[in-house]
Image (spheres, rainbow, N blue to C red):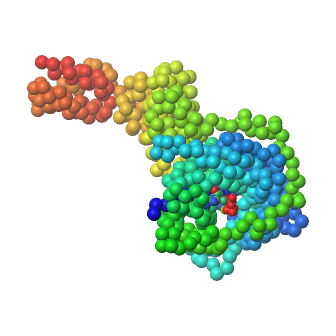
Amino acid sequence: MDFETTIGLEVHMQIKTKSKVFCECSTEFGAEPNTHICVICTSQPGAIPILNRKAVEAVVKTGLALGFTINKQCTFARKQYFYPDIPKDYQITQSEPPLCSKGKLAIKIDGQEKIINITRIHLEEDAGKLIHEIGSRKLDYSLLDLNRASVGLMELVTEPEISSADEAVVFLNELRDIVRYLGASDCSMEEGKMRCDVNVSVRPKGQKELGTRVEIKNMNTISGIHAAIVYESQRQIEVLSSGGKLVQETRLWEDEEGITKSMRSKEGALDYRYFPEPDLVPFDLTDEFIENLRKELPELPKVKEARFIKEYGLSEYDAHYLTSSRDIADYYEQALDAIASSQKISVGNAAKPIANWISTELGGKLNADNKEIKDSPVSSENIADLVSQILAGTISGKIAKTVFEEMYNTAKDPQTIIKEKGLVQISDENALSKICDEAISESAKAVTEYKSGKERAIGSIVGLVMKKSKGQANPQLVNKILAEKLKF
Ligand code: ADP
Ligand code: ZN
Ligand code: MG
């Protein structure tokens, strides 16, 4: 029998605000344990939560960007549970309505667009963190760090409409790009700022009802999510194929073993006994609040990518790379602005080579050094100027690589480096003519071949000229001069 897989994702993203969602403590990552805490986020009896307006803004912005209906009524609820990492034993979250209902995200699968509907996004508080080991030493007790307690989270829940591990990965990457553009979350999985519960079920192909779902909790790497979905759907298919039955349960992904393990049977909503949070009075968002956020929405990655291709004639690869973060896109367009204001060459001519220098040379170096573009030693003006120097014929593309290397290492501007190192391209015909003569007299074999009709033989003579000129000869001119000299 043939089976198909169905996946629904619950994505938790830590909201990027200076302070926590219900108190004024800092959200800074990596601080000494229990240094960003107060009576509110440590759950002291009688402490009263105060809502962070910026956190609401981040959730609404995300909702607007993904085509959600924004529910003006903002209410909070207590979700009861034995939380070892929330001393008050309930989490403040939203039940009905969430801030955002019914959105969607279009993803590209095998060149085809597929819409994934998203049920809701709601605002809630994060839990603290239990620590079971210090360094590599496993503890036989647990420690509690409450720095993360009450940091704002948005939880986004998709409809069960994702049909493979690959689709889930594309969805998550796309979502992360958008949320980062909005500045609503850093979504860094390494820092636990994006975590995912993955719901997986299988059913015989053609069957209408969905199969029994298994929830895999707290996944925090994209590769883990992919592997867990592949493993879990295969496991379920095997159970069903051998006549077994599946139970709705929560499982954990064991990364080292590459398997999922049962953790507990799934709790139902009733178990949580949600009730309205008495300390946070419901209120209505104003139209003005929502419309102002709508106006602040930035151009989103996919739209920007299409514009870069159309406006600057970039390849899909370059456009995709340049729009992979807002900082890179801004850097690129700042470089183009520099070209426009210097008025030496046209933006049309510079757009592609600049894109190329950023995506290959600069991107490669930053990547190797684990640096972000905002820490690039090469400024956008300087990379623009480097490309101007190439297009104006001052330096060859090859010398430009040497110049770039120096720019990256010293943060100096290209013209200074070209002057200091005497790297200006030799375009003086007399000077080049002399070097060409030398090269010809040392290349008897290539000359004979060339004269007997093998045109490619000129390549080695050009190479020799370049070597003699330490790479500084203007290659177009050298080709022209050699062709003339070797005519008869
Ligand atoms: P809970 O908190 O109980 O897990 P949620 O409504 O927050 O409930 O999330 C349920 C998730 O499970 C959603 O992403 C939904 O799309 C997904 N889901 C529901 N039924 C199935 C199913 N049969 N197969 C796969 N995913 C499912
Ligand atoms: Zn606090
Ligand atoms: Mg769930």
Q: How many marks?
A: 0
Residue 329 quadrant: top right
Q: Is residue 52 above or below residue 36?
A: above
Where residue 412 appears, as percent x and y from the top left, is 50, 36
- For image coordinates 73% across by 50% down, the residue present is 17
Q: Give the percent coordinates (x, y) of residue 440.
A: 16, 27
Residue 3 visible, this orientation: yes
Name which residue lies at 81% across and 37% down: 287
Q: Which quarter of the picture shows residue 140?
A: bottom right
The image quadrant where one finds the N terminus is bottom left
214 or 420, which is in the foreground?
A: 214
Identify the residue at the far bottom of this view: 140
Which residue is painted at 54% across and 36% down in the image? 305
233 to 454, vertically: above or below: below
Tell me if I can see residue 375 in this picture: no
Instruction: Name the quadrant containing residue 84.
Output: bottom right
The residue lying toward the viewer, choosing from 239 and 414, is 239
254 on left or right of 24? left
In which quadrant of the rendered image does the C terminus lie? top left
Q: Residue at x 14, y 31 (%)?
A: 446
Q: Is 116 located above or below residue 470 in the figure?
A: below
Please give left or right for residue 11 compared with residue 394 in the image: right
Q: Nearer the viewer, residue 154 or 276?
A: 276
How far across and how far down the image is residue 207, in percent? 55, 58
Q: Residue furthest front?
A: 207
Q: Residue 111, percent across and down?
A: 47, 42
